[in-house]
Image (cartoon, grey):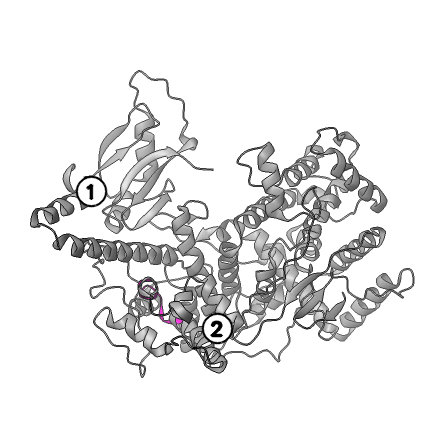
């Protein structure tokens, strides 16, 4: 990889270790072989990380949780894949456009972070108009608030140095205002506790709710809730769990060697109010989820003493048409003109289908490369004929198709894991325990742009199908991870300017992260319940603010207008049905409405089944797997419910919601 320093940034070309213009033929391969043998002999050919990295004081974390799994694992597949990548690039004489990662000015990273988190009105010219941010801050946990406070402090200090003329609020004033709005003044001598209401069981509009976000309640739940080392607790903030673990100096981690079967069998305990997956919330809710996930990830990294910095790429000129080397968003835009609604690039889908069409039992699938010259020719032919529909897929050998798939990933102008978060994905390897690594990956997946996330999901699902045939194709989880890690993680080679040994650290580390993403992919696409609860709280608070504003306006008019407004605020649940009964609408089914009596065991799937069993003269055109029950309004925008959601528990959480059965939105 080459680095060129500029006045405003660093130029990064594609990552190929030890790639020099003067290398003799075979120089890359022989040097890599010598290096890995040297480190194997020295005992350093493992995933032992740079011990200069700061470990939080007072923590008894066992770092073996992230290191031991690859200690005995041969890295040959990884280095061979790098050699194949090097050879492919050597045969491609087209000049690659360098990517420029901008080096931020002082405070610029923190300012950008606050904007990404939706908190830009805490500083600058709009700092006086921060009511919306006050509502947002009222839902944050102690560790989340500390992360925000740290960034606001840096930005305000930078602004003072720049001698900005507009008002620069003190960070303490921001959080004091937020507490004053609830009748409390933050005492900085005590840890900030974030209570969502005066009564933990009372929501802002006076309705009863069963969720709370207060730090006191969270600490109590952490201490009282029975847990297993393999249970992923989604009810409590990950950063709060890490802080509690640090404070109690209890660092139990799962320990094991490097086999596939020795990865922890992490699981999600059943949640009666339903599990929320990415894609099951309305866009306005997902916008809030994104902000909260960014703050939570930052808080988690802060607690664990790992630096979190979003990278920023300077915009560069890229191809505006074609297949390989086209920005993902642009590629989808041109594909959607041909196949409306598609979320995955058509060429990506076709390459996977082509690989699977033969058989997934082929030995060495993904590991054995296609012939480089043939792959290059196929790439050029695809560019010319794919969209015309004249490309002859019968001529594509399976290993060539696999090489084309990996080439597509590598040739993206920006990495699939994005410039912003690639380093954060890499740094997951530095977190103390496997559970914390999984939690960080969960938040990072949420933060990916939709196109990147959807494409990654399809890729991981495909890789798992390859692994399912490991008895025949000899491609186990560790083999697949070794082969795919260089294609996803070494796009920019952020660590390659450090000492040579760091190449081996990053190689083993990113291969381990790749294993995690494949093994736990179903968990990674789950939105943590504590974040969904924070979204609910924000929605409630915003509705209350709007209601209060509307009420003040109405008071200036006539008294009967006020009564009329209050009646309009009532939902059908208040007026149309008795207590303990919900009205469910199903406009797409023959039975369009039904009153449902709530019981302790009634689930969302039971209600859908009840509707589908009703016949009223119309032919039933929708099947059980095509329709879902939705929770709409109240303290959420819109949420698709999984079939195992217990309706009485959810009703108590959101009594003002409407309930609608409809097809799942694509």
Q: Is residue 569 left or right of residue 586?
A: left
Residue 232 visible in the shown view: no
Q: Is residue 595 left or right of residue 372?
A: left
Q: CA distance from mark 2 to mark 1?
A: 43 Å
Q: Is residue 351 left or right of residue 190?
A: right
Kindly report the secondary structure that dominates the magenta region of the rendered protein: helix
The numbered dot on residue 302 is: 2
| Above-or-below relation of 464 to 48 | above
- Name the residue located 13 percent from the left edge and 55 percent from the top edge: 556
| Residue wearing tag 1 | 571
Residue 38 visible in the shown view: yes
- Where on the picture, by quarter, is residue 420? bottom right
Please tell me whether mark 1 sits on a helix, a strand or a loop: loop
Q: Position of residue 658 (x, y in %)?
A: 27, 41
- Name the residue located 61 percent from the left edge and 39 percent from the top edge: 334
In magenta, the rendered stretch is 134-144
For label 2, count other residues whose C-alpha is less than 10 Å away and answer few (under 14), some (14-19) or many (20+).
many
């Amino acid at each position: 990889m080459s680095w060129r320093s500029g006045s405003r940034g660093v130029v990064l070309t594609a990552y190929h270790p030890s790639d020099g213009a003067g290398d003799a033929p075979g120089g890359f391969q022989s040097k890599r072989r010598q290096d890995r043998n040297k480190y194997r002999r020295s005992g350093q050919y493992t995933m032992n990380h740079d011990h200069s990295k700061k470990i939080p004081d007072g923590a008894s974390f066992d770092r073996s949780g992230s290191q031991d799994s690859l200690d005995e694992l041969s890295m040959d597949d990884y280095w061979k894949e790098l050699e194949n990548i090097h050879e492919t690039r050597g045969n491609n004489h087209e000049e690659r456009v360098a990517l420029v990662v901008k080096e931020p000015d002082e405070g610029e990273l923190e300012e950008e972070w606050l904007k990404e988190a939706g908190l830009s009105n805490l500083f600058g010219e709009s700092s006086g108009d921060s009511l919306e941010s006050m509502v947002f801050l009222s839902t944050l946990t102690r560790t989340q608030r500390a992360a925000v406070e740290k960034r606001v402090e840096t930005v305000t200090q930078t602004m003072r140095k720049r001698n900005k003329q507009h008002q620069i609020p003190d960070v303490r004033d921001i959080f004091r205002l937020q507490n004053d709005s609830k009748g409390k003044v933050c005492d900085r001598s005590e840890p900030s506790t974030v209570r969502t209401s005066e009564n933990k069981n009372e929501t802002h509009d006076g309705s009863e709710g069963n969720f709370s976000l207060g730090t006191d309640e969270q600490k109590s739940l952490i201490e009282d809730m029975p847990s297993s080392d393999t249970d992923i607790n989604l009810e409590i903030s990950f950063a709060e769990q890490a802080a509690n673990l640090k404070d109690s100096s209890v660092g139990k981690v799962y320990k094991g060697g490097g086999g596939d079967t020795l990865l922890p069998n992490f699981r999600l305990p059943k949640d009666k109010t339903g599990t929320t997956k990415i894609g099951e919330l309305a866009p306005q809710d997902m916008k809030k989820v994104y902000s909260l996930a960014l703050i939570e990830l930052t808080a988690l990294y802060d607690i664990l003493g790992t630096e979190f910095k979003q990278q920023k790429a300077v915009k560069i000129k890229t191809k505006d048409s074609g297949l390989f080397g086209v920005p993902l968003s642009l590629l989808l835009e041109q594909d959607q003109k041909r196949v409306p609604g598609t979320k995955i690039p058509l060429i990506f889908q076709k390459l996977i289908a082509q690989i699977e069409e033969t058989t997934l039992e082929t030995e060495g699938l993904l590991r054995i490369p296609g012939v480089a010259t043939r792959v290059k020719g196929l790439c050029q032919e695809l560019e010319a004929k794919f969209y015309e529909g004249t490309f002859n897929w019968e001529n594509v050998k399976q290993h060539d198709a696999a090489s084309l798939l990996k080439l597509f990933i590598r040739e993206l102008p920006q990495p699939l894991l994005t410039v912003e978060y690639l380093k954060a994905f890499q740094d997951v390897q530095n977190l103390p325990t496997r559970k914390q690594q999984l939690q960080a990956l969960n938040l990072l997946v949420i933060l990916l742009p939709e196109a990147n996330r959807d494409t990654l999901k399809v890729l991981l699902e495909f890789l798992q199908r390859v692994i399912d045939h490991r008895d025949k194709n000899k491609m186990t989880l560790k083999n697949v991870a070794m082969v795919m890690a260089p294609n996803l993680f070494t796009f920019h080679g952020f660590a390659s300017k450090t000492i040579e040994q760091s190449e081996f650290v990053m190689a083993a580390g990113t291969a381990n992260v790749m294993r995690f993403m494949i093994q736990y992919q179903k968990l990674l696409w789950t939105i943590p319940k504590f974040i969904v609860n924070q979204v609910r709280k924000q929605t409630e608070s915003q509705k209350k603010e709007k209601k209060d504003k509307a009420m003040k306006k109405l008071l200036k008019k006539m008294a009967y207008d006020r009564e009329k407004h209050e009646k309009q605020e009532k939902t059908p649940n208040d007026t149309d049905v008795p207590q303990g009964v919900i009205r469910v609408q199903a406009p797409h089914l023959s039975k369009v409405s039904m009153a449902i009596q709530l019981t302790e065991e009634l689930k969302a799937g039971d209600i859908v089944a009840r509707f589908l069993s009703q016949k009223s003269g119309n032919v039933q055109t929708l099947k059980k797997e095509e329709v879902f029950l939705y929770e709409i309004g109240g303290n959420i925008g819109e949420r698709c419910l999984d079939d195992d959601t217990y309706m009485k528990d959810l009703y108590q959480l959101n009594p003002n919601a409407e309930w609608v059965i409809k097809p799942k939105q694509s």
